[in-house]
Image (cartoon, grey):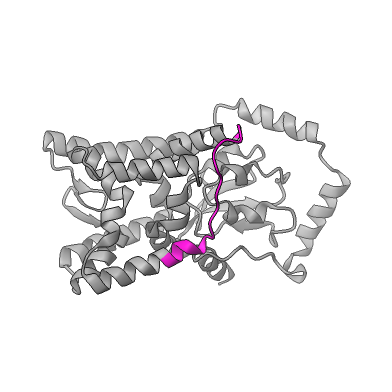
Amino acid sequence: MGYFVESLRQLIGFAPRKPAAEAIRPEVREIHLLKRREKVTKAEIRAIEIAHARARTRHKWRNRRWATLIAVNLLFLLSYTFDVQLLEGAMTASRFVGFHFADLNSALQVTLAYKHVVLNLLIGTTTVFVMWWLLGGRTFCSWACPYHLLAEGAEWLHLKLAARKWPAQVKFHRGTRTVFYLLFVVLTAATGYTLFETLSPTGIVSRALIYGPGLALLWVLALLAFEVLVSRRAWCRYVCPIGVTYGVVGLLSPLRVQYDVRRCHHEGDCRKVCLVPHVLDLTIRGRAGELTTDVGADCTRCGLCIDICPTDSLRFTFKGLERLK
């Protein structure tokens, strides 16, 4: 229940809570005392990081994720181009070898706009709900969303420019995403118009890839420019309701990222690469109350923190099964 409540709090924009002193298990306190007595030097940590950077598995999960993301979106294009009817439609609504799939947020928008539930939409959302529940709610964001890959490129450029102190680095309160979520819901229900679908770069990029580019891509380019020059990953962090929807679905997902306090040197590299670094606040010394703690449902399961961790303090786990390697 604690994981559920804390994850929900983070999804709607609250900062992670630091565990009370009495909530930290004695064995965790003992580990922190041992780390202070036998403190690893910066030189030793640097040597571990250098060895890890040279490992062949350094970008294992990133490469798997990119390959999956590209393959899924390319399958839409190939199916349409060659009319093989394997994967029809676009990312917002599709049919895979006869099975209907519908993005949960898009389905909500359509239902609110037209005030009734279409049977195929219900079937499609049920399929998608079960799939993304198994994979972990926000897995969609980093493993399927075509805009995410473009935003990663914009983020890379933003960080390159930030190293030279050039672009602005504006941060907004994460609760703005919840405000936008409610705003889109209210406006859709009141106007009967699926406003978010018009603005969503996920749908725009997906349709442009399959059916050809249109003027709507100018909006996507404007978003990317804003993220490069003003605010890192602004759309995904502060506006997009898709992440909230899938995050709620993934609250009780069996697939999670798990943190092991015994292995961690608390160097903080994982938080630097994370799209949603607040979910990794538990890696800060004294912020984990258990020997192993599951990262909250606002996590996108992108695997970047796992790739960069030199001590395997962060790993994928699937409840009831062995740890994923």
Q: Is residue 263 above or below residue 164?
A: below
For the N terminus, the image quarter is: bottom right
Q: Residue at x 31, y 46 (%)?
A: 219
Q: Position of residue 260 (x, y in %)?
A: 66, 51
Relative to 292, 72 lies left or right: left
- Most distant residue in the left direction: 83
Relative to 321, 218 lies left or right: left
Q: Position of residue 163 (x, y in %)?
A: 61, 33
Q: Position of residue 96 (x, y in %)?
A: 20, 48
Q: Quadrant of residue 225?
A: top left
Residue 148 in view of the camera: no
- Most distant residue in the right direction: 37
Q: Position of residue 222 (x, y in %)?
A: 36, 43
Q: Which residues are magenta?
A: 163-179
Q: Is residue 1 magenta?
A: no
Q: Is residue 248 above or below residue 78?
A: below
Q: Quadrant of residue 189?
A: bottom left
Work out whether residue 244 or residue 47 is closer to the camera in this orientation and state it.
244
Relative to 304, 27 lies left or right: right
Q: Residue at x 20, y 54 (%)?
A: 99
Relative to 274, 239 lies left or right: left
Q: Residue at x 30, y 69 (%)?
A: 187
Q: Residue at x 61, y 53 (%)?
A: 280
Work out whether residue 150 or residue 59 is closer to the camera in this orientation and state it.
150
